[in-house]
Amino acid sequence: MSSVRVLVGTRKGAFVLTSDGKRQRWDVAGPHFGGWEIYHMKGSPADPDRLYASQSSGWFGQLIQRSNDAGKTWEAVGNKFAYEGEIGTHQWFDGAPHPWEFKRVWHLEPSLTDPDTVYAGVEDAALFRSSDGGQTWHELRGLRGHDTGAGWHPGAGGMCLHTILLDPSNPARIFTAVSAAGAFRTDDAGLSWRTITRGLKSEFLPDPAAEIGHCIHHIAMHPSRPNVLFMQKHWDVMRSDDAGDSWREVSGNLPTDFGFVIDVHAHQPETIYVVPIKSDSEHYPPEGKLRVFRSRTGGNEWEALTNGLPQSDCYVNVLRDAMAIDSLDECGVYFGTTGGQVYASADAGDTWAPIVRDLPAVLSVEVQTLP
Amino acid sequence: MIRVILPAHLRALAKVPGEVQLDIEGPATQGSVLSALEARYPMLRGTIRDQVTQQRRPFVRFFGCGQDLSHESPDAPLPDAVASGAEPFLLVGAIAGG
């Protein structure tokens, strides 16, 4: 019988939640790496027992952990993230040039085909790759070396590369997103990159339609249609039908178009999910009601999903990497909150129940669907 | 022989239950002690000092003989009592964070 494994990164450790295909009863393992921030944890599509975790702390810096047995045991692998070539500068908050400084790994994206190959999106924004299971890391210099790189600047959360999407139909194509620089695409496996921001508008910029400076929070893709991208921007939910060459807004009837997460249904590429957050300074759901919004039309027309979610006095946030969707039929949807809850829906969002209620603040949620 | 006491999180990471004892070739300095420590426990690389710049991480301090040695040169000799193993070399996580 199929089963699922939910990988949860929190402010104070990692947790592995497992269930059978019914997704009603859960085993909770953890905390792994107690006391450390786990920004992200993800399994290899090519070997589900191979997991990678980004472990960091303000005291002791960045570590990468690897498991070969589905999270039962872990080993620390390479953690030397050295920028390639001339370090260069980006813009600081005051507009002054500021040298790139490695701070942490926000996102780990394992290769679709090779368990030993994994990408790391880091702060200050850069993309690294390991092809030896995380032992050594090498920067894909072309991204940071983009013509616009010296003009990138951090968002409030730091200048982080937080989204890495691998195109399953084209191994040379990768999408990335950086707060608050923008979105980028390579079509030559990382050698060269282009901005993919046409159609984005950010009113906080002097030129709202500028090439860079957009605070993109997350991008999602359905693997069957890699040219269709969905974006939750600082404000605005956006959609592209041409691999990011152009974007149009699909916020439609959302109560607020601010938010962090966005994801796509496993079997319906036009069904997408967001969690609206009140505003950029009020990082909690509007009206104290925790609602997932689902569009079955690829945006614009949204329905609130509330069954099983708190509908009063709820003031948690859902961070950008804290939603995931399994590929069972029907698909499960998961998200974690800064209040430490991880909610699951085994019916594509119609009903919800917490798997756990009292974890440390959740930073990331991923799910593996196992045979 | 140098005795090194790690903070709890680094003991857990290195899977050592208590004090670490290291034999150092040449003069006992912060740099030589950390190099020996990292050679025996590679998972500690980058957790105490930056792997690229070799700078001490800001929230890690070095104590010995009741003194804060954090701002001493990495190449300066450690106090005799630390170098002889009479006193431990302490790596301390600063009181900070949440």
Image (tube, grey):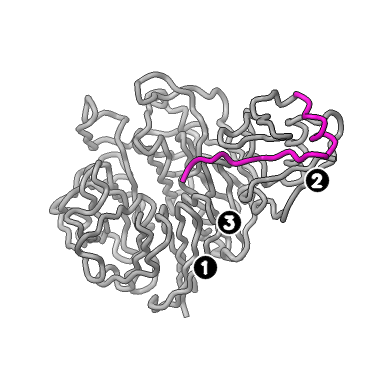
Determine the image quadrant of residue A357: bottom left
Q: Which residues are magenta?
A: B76-98
**Is residue A168 in the magenta section?**
no
Q: Is A294 on the left-hand or right-hand side of B73?
A: left
Disc ID at residue A115: 3
In terms of secondary structure, where does tag 3 sit?
A: loop
Residue A238 in sight in this render: no
Q: Is A16 on the left-hand or right-hand side of A151?
A: right
Query: Residue at (59%, 41%) from the top-left corner?
Result: B93
Residue B67 percent location from the top left of the image: 68, 31
In terms of secondary structure, where does tag 1 sit?
A: strand
Which residue has dot 2 on it?
B21
Residue B48 in sight in this render: yes
Proximity of marks 1 and 3: CB atoms separated by less than 8 Å? no
What amino acid type is highlighted by mark number 1? Ala
Q: Is the stretch drawn in magenta largely helix, strand or loop?
A: loop
What amino acid type is highlighted by mark number 3? Pro
Q: CA distance from mark 2 to mark 1?
A: 34 Å
Query: Residue at (28%, 47%) from the top-left corner?
Result: A232
Number of numbered labels in the structure image? 3
Q: Are marks 2 and 3 on the same chain?
A: no
The chain containing the residue under callout 2 comes to B
Neighbourhood count class around disc 1 (C-alpha, 10 Å): few under 14, some 14–19, many 20 upward: some
In terms of secondary structure, where does tag 2 sit?
A: strand
**Is residue B81 in the magenta section?**
yes
Tag in front: 1 or 3: 1
What amino acid type is highlighted by mark number 2? Gln
Which residue has dot 1 on it?
A29
